[in-house]
Amino acid sequence: MEKIAIASDHAGRELKEDLKEYLKGMGFEVVDMGVDNDESVDYPDYGAPVAEKVSSGELAKGVLLCGTGIGMSILANKYRRVRAALVNDVYTARMAKEHNDANILVIGGRIVGKGLAREMLKSWLEARFEGGRHQRRLDKITEVENRIDR
Ligand code: RB5
């Protein structure tokens, strides 16, 4: 069973719970890294463990949610080998995989409803990276990663 990590802050928790059930229904083993209540928390505390698992290669995919998705995507993209895509529509979700090989999908729990969120998640999961010229572009991002002093 393929594993996928998921995490949110308080503003994304309701959507996280819904997407978790959806992912289970699709046959995934969901690694829920919190948050598990509605108290206000800091999104980096919950996003970082997911980004670390994807960055290290322990898990191939992750889903992050906060209010807008902005904070989680800024955070996740600090990590080497993480390509986190903040999406608000189904086309972008599909392209995030086909062209960008995004390994973390980020959604704003205060922006997107459950139906659209499920459709975006499904499109991203079912899409396939096209490689070719897109791989060349990702290689250039990796070159930048390797040049930056971290
Ligand atoms: C929390 O209020 C909110 O700032 C957070 O969920 C997220 O939207 C940050 O980008």
Image (cartoon, rainbow, N blue to C red):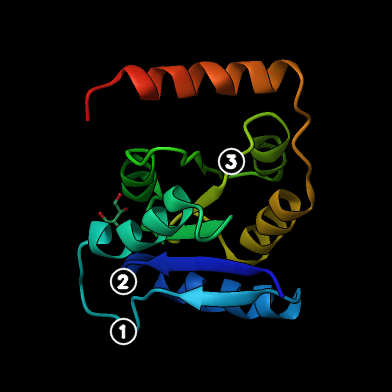
Circle 1 Cα neighbour tier, 10 Å, few/some/many (<14 / 14–19 / ≥20): few
Q: Nearer the viewer, residue 112 or 3?
A: 3
76 sits left or right of 30 in the view: left
Position of the N terminus by quadrant: bottom right
N-term-proximal mark, 2 vs 3? 2
The quadrant holding residue 3 is bottom right
Spot occupied by residue 141 in the image (x, y as percentages of width and height) = 48, 21
- Mark closer to the observer (2, 3): 3
Picture disc at residue 10 = 2
Q: Measuring from the top left, give residue 132's x and y in whole percent.
A: 77, 19
Amino acid carrying label 3: it is Ala
Q: Which residue is mark 3?
A: 102
Ligand number 1: quarter of image: bottom left
Cα distance between the residues tagged 2 and 1 = 7 Å
Dot 3 or dot 1: first in sequence order is: 1
Q: Residue at x 56, y 20 (%)?
A: 139
- Density class for disc 3 (Cα within 10 Å; few <14, some 14-19, many ≥20) is many
Residue that appears at 36% across and 44% down: 70
**Marks 3 and 2: in contact by CB < 8 Å?**
no
Residue 112: which numbered mark, if any? none
Q: Answer whether labels 2 and 1 touch (C-beta < 8 Å).
A: yes
Name the element at disc 1: loop
Q: Which residue is mark 1?
A: 37
Q: Amino acid at mark 2?
A: His
Instruction: Give the structural element (helix, strand or loop) at label 2.
Output: helix
